[in-house]
Amino acid sequence: MYVPSVTNPIGDYVREWVPQLVAYLPESLQGETTCSVIAFAINAIICIIAVCLVNIGSAPILIYMERKVCAHVQCRLGPMRLGWHGTIQTIADVLKMLFKEVYSPQGADKKLFYLAPLIVLIAPFMIAALIPFGHNLLVANVDMGIPLIIAVNGFGVLGILLGGWSSNNKYSLMGSLRSGAQMISYEISFALVLLFVVMVSGSTNLMEITNGQAGTVANWMIFKVPVLGFLAFIMFFIASTAEMNRAPFDIAEAEQELTGGYHTEYTGTPFAMFYLAEYIALVTNSALAVTCFLGGFHAPCIGFESVDQILLKVPGVIWFFAKVYFMIWCYMMVRWTFVRPRVDQLMSFEWKFMLPVNMLLLVGGAAYIALSI
């Protein structure tokens, strides 16, 4: 029977239980192939449900969290009316979006108009399937994990361009073109930083990159390569913020200039899908930062055995999500602290600063590897 390279108790239980189920089938259908196919299908369904729960379940929490972070940064209260400290406000907003009328503007390309929000959701869901959440909590252990992540990130650009163009609205079109130019530009820096991680770790597999950071905090990528690791982390943070179209790099949605950007004409559920994609991307980019730079699911051991023994008793998945939510908090603090630059300043920052620094970062990483051999 097919057994994946990274197993977990749930998958193992399914593979043990399936032969008992297959025994009830006609004799002609019984066999190892049938068991493998059924076990694979059941485990695939479980994995899909798990990825959806992590991503979609995180969105309401993050919306509430962002409102409260914004409120504290700007000395306000945030939602307070519905539930304790406004905890039910997000649920009310979700219900409102689900029941609002869905319509397309006159002259819009309806097929592409409704397809665009679905395309935008593809990339974050695929990336989430590649992230190792624990020692045995991984959906797909792909050897070419980093190149695959770089490749699927392009789906987000395609969905936004289609959404703006198909709306038959000049503001939406301008917003989508801005966003496309911004995302494609910053994806270059995003890819170069990930290539730096691949170069230093010697692998494109996310599980191997995580295991290469096992041990103490000093083994985390951010500290493992002196100065260069921290610089690469900052470059990743900036590039991923721009690539997600989050403030202060949200020129694609500049309300003062473009009414609302590429999703101006969207209402109800399609608009909610664009909104959902932003928060799922926030989770996946934070998880990717944790995996590549902050030790993944490994505990933050400091080298003192008495302290490390206590830290190691906490399950790796808890450490992983603690680090992920710390990264999410950092993204939110940046959003509500810095002002939005002009579009020309944003593009100049990428091509005149980020790209040269990332090229030098690769050269520095190569020099570090050569000297450490």
Image (cartoon, rainbow, N blue to C red):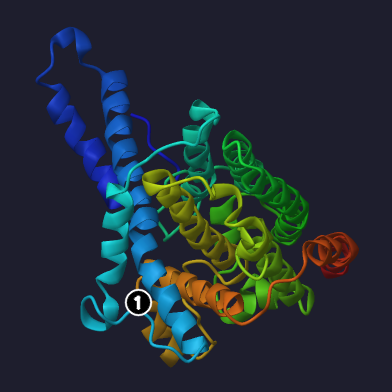
Looking at the image, residue 349 sits to the left or right of residue 180; the answer is right
- Residue in the picture at 29% in, 56% down: 96
Q: Does 83 sit left or right of 134 as displayed?
A: left
Q: Is residue 40 visible?
A: yes
Residue 137 position, x and y percent, is 39, 55
| Residue drawn where x is 70% and y is 60% of the image | 197
Q: Is residue 130 above or below residue 323?
A: above
Residue 373 appears in the picture as rendered: no
Above/below status of 311 relative to 59: below
Considering depth in this image, is 120 or 144 the residue closer to the camera?
120
Q: Amino acid at mark 1?
A: Val
Give the position of the C terminus as an image quadrant.
bottom right
Q: Percent position (x, y) of residue 348?
A: 86, 63
Residue positioned most to the left = 24
Judging depth in this view, the residue of 100 and 131 nearest the camera is 100
- Name the one closer to the observer, 106 or 57: 106
Q: Residue at x 41, y 81 (%)?
A: 68
Secondary structure state at the residue bearing disc 1: loop
- On screen, residue 279 above or below 247: above
User: Which residue in the protein does label 1 denote?
Assistant: 314
